[in-house]
């Protein structure tokens, strides 16, 4: 069933929180979003069930064809979509997010066949691209490839490369297919802030700035796609440079090539975009506490714990009389659940009026690599 809600700059957030199912009692509606774009006095919201999405898809496509931006669910996080071949629409994405123009966008395609419309694939990596896209698309793997001249420079921030993926989310796929154009879509948050994994989180970030949010509930992965570039090697498997850890893990990629991290980029060198240190950041200072013994609380300050399991026997849970404890994977300690809940839990703690959030590390294996990457970036103040 398609339900509709006219929301004046986030006015019905409280209701949304309840409808999210897993996102109850979060207090997400406490702070009203800023209304910046006078062209967009209110943000409409369409709720959609997977088996009945026609109205939402039609409305989203109508707006995208008119050069507007629309927030759409993907399997990783909600994205702020625009027609990738329309530079004016893409400019609206940068404006709504307050994103610096040196930080390029990911282009989403409807089918593997569409890859040639946005990228020029060199012969020496063609087999590898075919293997990776057969194995992981549609899904949360983004490939950095030489750009097709039709992709506007604004999308790629003037780089000769383009980042491309095919989303696995049924709503995003349906919009991508019906639009018959590639979709540029960064995460639907203000620049540097926590990525949204629910429509209510998008409303908080961008309510009053964009005309439409399509709400299909919580995202199933919870962290953004894995991003790699490919370096061919003659007679050997290629090297995959890991630009961002994500749901497709190093272990999964290793079957097809050797995975190596790219050198971390400092904010002073924006010509190498994307990996700015401070990212995914709550407004409340977040401290990643690698060793519980290093915690020295200041008198009178309120601390909250971002715990892995929240279990009583954890050395972190018993370290302090916490104002609030929020767990990534309550009880069970599953990395997949922790990834899904990460940004939601960060938001809850951010809105609890704390002086600092203390984060417990998770084991850096599989999905834990992506979780620790986000926690480290959230902990750095830019
Ligand atoms: O899961 C995802 O990837 C989500 C959903 C919406 O698809 N998108 C997302 O987009 O996380 P965004 O813009 O928040 O992050 C994209 C990252 C940025 O760090 C950007 O700098 C990097 O990809 N990027 C884009 N194009 C690039 C390029 N040509 N070379 C290097 N990095 C690039
Ligand atoms: Mg982002």
Image (cartoon, helix red, strand yellow):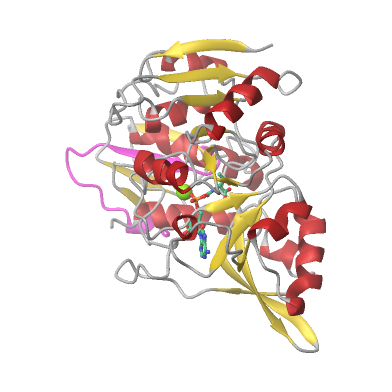
Residue 107 sits inside the magenta stretch: no
Residue 372, x across and y down, in percent? 51, 56
Please give left or right for residue 196 compared with residue 149 in the image.
left
Furthest toward the bottom, the residue is: 234
The front one of 60 and 245 is: 60
> Residue drawn at (42%, 17%), measured in percent from left and top?
13
Residue 190 found in image quarter: top left
Residue 378, x across and y down, in percent? 39, 51
> Residue drawn at (74%, 62%), measured in percent from left and top?
252
Please give left or right for residue 141 compared with residue 124 in the image.
left
Residue 80, x across and y down, in percent? 50, 39
Residue 306 sits inside the magenta stretch: yes
The front one of 47 and 196 is: 47
Residue 130 found in image quarter: bottom right
Q: State whether residue 235 is above or below residue 332.
A: below
Q: State whether residue 214 is above or below residue 132.
A: above
Residue 316, x across and y down, in percent? 44, 46
- In this orientation, does residue 258 appear? yes
- In this orientation, does residue 22 appear? no
Q: State whether residue 48 is above or below residue 127.
A: above
Q: Which residues are magenta?
A: 289-312
Q: State whether residue 381 is above or below residue 145.
A: above
> Residue drawn at (70%, 20%), measured in percent from left and top?
54
Q: Quadrant of the N terminus?
A: top right
């Amino acid at each position: 069933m398609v339900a509709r809600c006219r929301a004046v700059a986030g006015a019905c957030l409280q209701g949304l929180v309840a409808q999210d199912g897993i996102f109850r009692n979060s207090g997400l509606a406490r702070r009203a979003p800023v209304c910046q774009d006078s062209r967009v006095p209110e943000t409409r919201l369409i709720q959609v069930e997977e088996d009945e999405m026609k109205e939402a898809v039609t409305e989203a496509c109508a707006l995208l064809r008119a050069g507007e931006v629309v927030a759409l669910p993907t399997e990783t996080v909600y994205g702020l979509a625009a027609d990738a071949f329309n530079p004016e629409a893409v400019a609206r994405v940068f404006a709504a997010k307050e994103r610096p123009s040196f930080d390029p966008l990911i282009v989403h395609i409807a089918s593997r066949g569409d890859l040639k419309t946005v990228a020029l694939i060199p012969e020496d990596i063609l087999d590898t691209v075919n293997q990776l896209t057969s194995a992981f698309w549609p899904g949360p793997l983004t490939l950095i490839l030489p750009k097709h001249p039709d992709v506007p420079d604004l999308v790629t921030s003037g780089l000769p490369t383009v980042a491309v993926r095919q989303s696995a989310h049924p709503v995003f796929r349906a919009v991508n297919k019906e639009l018959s154009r590639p979709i540029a879509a960064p995460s639907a948050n203000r620049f540097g802030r926590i990525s949204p994994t629910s429509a209510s989180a998008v409303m908080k970030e961008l309510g009053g700035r964009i005309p439409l949010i399509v709400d299909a509930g919580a995202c199933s992965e919870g962290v953004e796609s894995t991003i790699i570039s490919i370096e061919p090697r003659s007679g050997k498997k290629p090297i995959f440079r890991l630009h961002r850890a994500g749901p497709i893990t190093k272990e999964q990629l290793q079957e097809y090539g050797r995975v190596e991290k790219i050198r971390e980029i400092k904010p002073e060198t924006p010509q190498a975009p994307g990996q700015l240190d401070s990212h995914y950041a709550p407004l409340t200072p977040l401290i990643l506490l690698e060793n519980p013994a290093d915690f020295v609380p200041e008198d009178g300050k309120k601390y909250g714990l971002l715990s892995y399991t929240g279990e009583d026997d954890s050395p972190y849970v018993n370290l302090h009389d916490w104002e609030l404890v929020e767990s990534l994977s309550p009880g069970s300690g599953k990395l997949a659940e922790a990834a899904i809940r990460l940004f939601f839990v960060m938001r809850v703690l951010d809105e609890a009026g704390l002086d600092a959030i203390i984060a417990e590390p998770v084991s850096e294996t599989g999905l834990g690599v992506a979780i620790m990457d986000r926690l480290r970036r959230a902990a750095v103040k830019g």
